[in-house]
Image: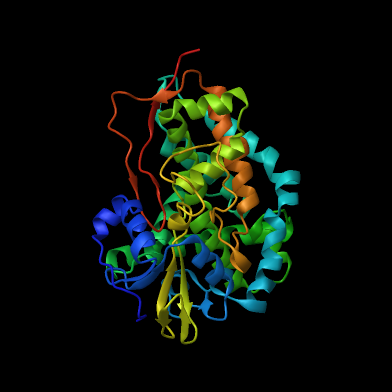
């Protein structure tokens, strides 16, 4: 355990809204040990930016970590040459150039298809009907698991997210996660023969064709599903909700004063879909007047960094005109999110603008309950009931 000051939290309250306690941590104990989750939290943007690049100390290697145990050892849990080698094979599928050349047009097509399927009731919950569907259909294409449903991918993603965040050791959560990873293995088994005969641009095909060992292919597909479904899903639903609850910001983007990408970047700064990233202390180390012991667990709190008062004035305010350049939405250093270009394209270029283009007079459903958010490691709206005009 580190020498950092101890800060206790109410886990339920932290799940419901982590931002008030994170603000207190930044102000009075920016590096602190939280016994309820058994980790030392680093909450200020500069500290995270520095420490995340020091992989010799703040290591992604976590041999006994939940992600390795439940999902297999993927590139996110590797450092140095081992990480770079797998990333080199993985990255070409979702590089900015490949996103522009292949995936961008497909994202438009599948998003239009989802909107075409909306019924004539003039009302829906955007989380399952739009955000989940759009992110899932995109992920099916990118992973190569085109035979499954987007509901399958969403359920598997959530099960793995819950599993790797199961720091209290709930056996039911672990059971559900194991069932999800087994189902993904079955889906991979179904697709591999087809992709051997007819390779394509999907991750499953590209990694296999490059000769990556099958256990690594499977682990990296599971990694992609675990993060590639929930982050765009939560960003799509959350950003639409943010615009509907901040009409002045919607006016800015509709008038062309700000771009849809600015909406995406500011939303992800304001309410980070991925709130933290875990690390293992590889060797005894001192930083910021705190002594860290080898093998202890540290969480980089991206959600807190993105509201750091040193970089963002009035950080609790959703403001699409602000400079978000200092935000750590996709991390920093060697583990910067490989899927950043795909996420920006799908969410910022397509999914957010498309719904305002296609549905006239879109608004929150006044008769529904207020929108609630949940999560601190991963965070998004639980439901976003909306209605719109009829032609």
Toward which corner of the image does residue 218 lie, by quadrant?
Answer: bottom right
Identity of the residue drawn at 23% across and 60% down = 10
Residue 141: percent from the left, percent from the top? Answer: 62, 48
- Front in this rendered view, residue 320 or 237: 320
Is residue 53 shown to the viewer in this render?
yes
- Front in this rendered view, residue 305 or 300: 305
Identity of the residue drawn at 43% across and 40% down = 317
- Front in this rendered view, residue 78 or 278: 278
Residue 343 horizontal side relative to residue 10, left or right? right
Residue 117: percent from the left, percent from the top? Answer: 51, 28
Total residue callouts: 0
Identity of the residue drawn at 42% across and 52% down = 155
Residue 253 horizontal side relative to residue 1, left or right? right
Q: Give the position of the N terminus as an image quadrant.
A: bottom left
Q: Which colour scheme is used?
A: rainbow
Residue 374: percent from the left, percent from the top? Answer: 34, 49
Identity of the residue drawn at 76% across and 45% down = 101
Indicate whether 145 appears above or below 323.
Answer: below
Indicate whether 345 appears above or below 63.
Answer: above
- Front in this rendered view, residue 1 or 156: 1
- Residue at the far top: name it: 391
Residue 316 horizontal side relative to residue 227, left or right? left
Toward which corner of the image does residue 303 lie, by quadrant?
Answer: bottom left
Is residue 144 shown to the viewer in this render?
no
Residue 173: percent from the left, percent from the top? Answer: 32, 63
Indicate whether 189 appears above or below 81.
Answer: above
């Amino acid at each position: 355990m580190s020498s950092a000051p101890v800060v206790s939290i109410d886990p339920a309250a932290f799940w419901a809204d982590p931002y008030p306690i994170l603000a207190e941590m930044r102000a009075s104990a920016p590096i602190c040990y939280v016994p309820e989750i058994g980790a030392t939290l680093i909450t200020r943007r500069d500290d995270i930016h520095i420490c995340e690049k020091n992989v010799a100390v703040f290591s992604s290697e976590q041999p006994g970590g939940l992600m390795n145990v439940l999902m297999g050892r993927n590139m996110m849990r590797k450092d140095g040459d081992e990480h770079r080698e797998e990333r080199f094979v993985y990255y070409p599928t979702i590089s900015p150039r490949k996103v522009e050349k292949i995936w961008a047009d497909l994202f438009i097509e599948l998003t239009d298809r989802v909107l075409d399927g909306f019924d004539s009731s003039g009302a829906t919950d955007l989380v399952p009907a739009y955000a989940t569907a759009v992110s899932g259909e995109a992920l099916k294409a990118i992973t190569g698991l085109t035979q499954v449903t987007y509901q399958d991918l969403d359920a598997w993603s959530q099960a793995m997210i819950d599993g790797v965040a199961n720091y209290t050791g709930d056996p039911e959560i672990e059971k559900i996660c194991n069932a999800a990873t087994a189902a993904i293995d079955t889906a991979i088994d179904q697709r591999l023969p087809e992709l051997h005969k007819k390779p394509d641009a999907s991750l499953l095909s590209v990694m296999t064709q490059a000769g990556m060992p099958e256990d690594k292919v499977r682990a990296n597909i599971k990694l992609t599903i675990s993060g590639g479904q929930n982050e765009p899903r939560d960003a799509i639903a959350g950003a639409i909700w943010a615009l509907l609850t901040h009409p002045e910001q919607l006016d800015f983007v509709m008038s062309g004063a700000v771009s849809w990408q600015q909406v995406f970047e500011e939303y992800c700064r304001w309410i980070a879909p991925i709130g933290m990233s875990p690390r293992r202390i590889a060797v005894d180390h001192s930083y910021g007047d705190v002594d860290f012991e080898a093998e202890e667990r540290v969480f980089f709190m991206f959600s807190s960094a993105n509201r750091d008062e040193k970089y963002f004035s009035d950080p609790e305010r959703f403001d699409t005109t602000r400079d978000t350049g200092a935000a750590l939405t996709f991390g920093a250093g060697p583990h910067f999110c490989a899927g950043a270009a795909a996420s920006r394209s799908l969410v910022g270029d397509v999914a957010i603008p498309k719904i305002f283009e296609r549905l006239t007079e879109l608004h929150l459903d006044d008769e529904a309950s207020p929108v609630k958010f949940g999560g601190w490691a991963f965070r998004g709206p639980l439901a976003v009931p909306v209605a719109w005009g009829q032609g």
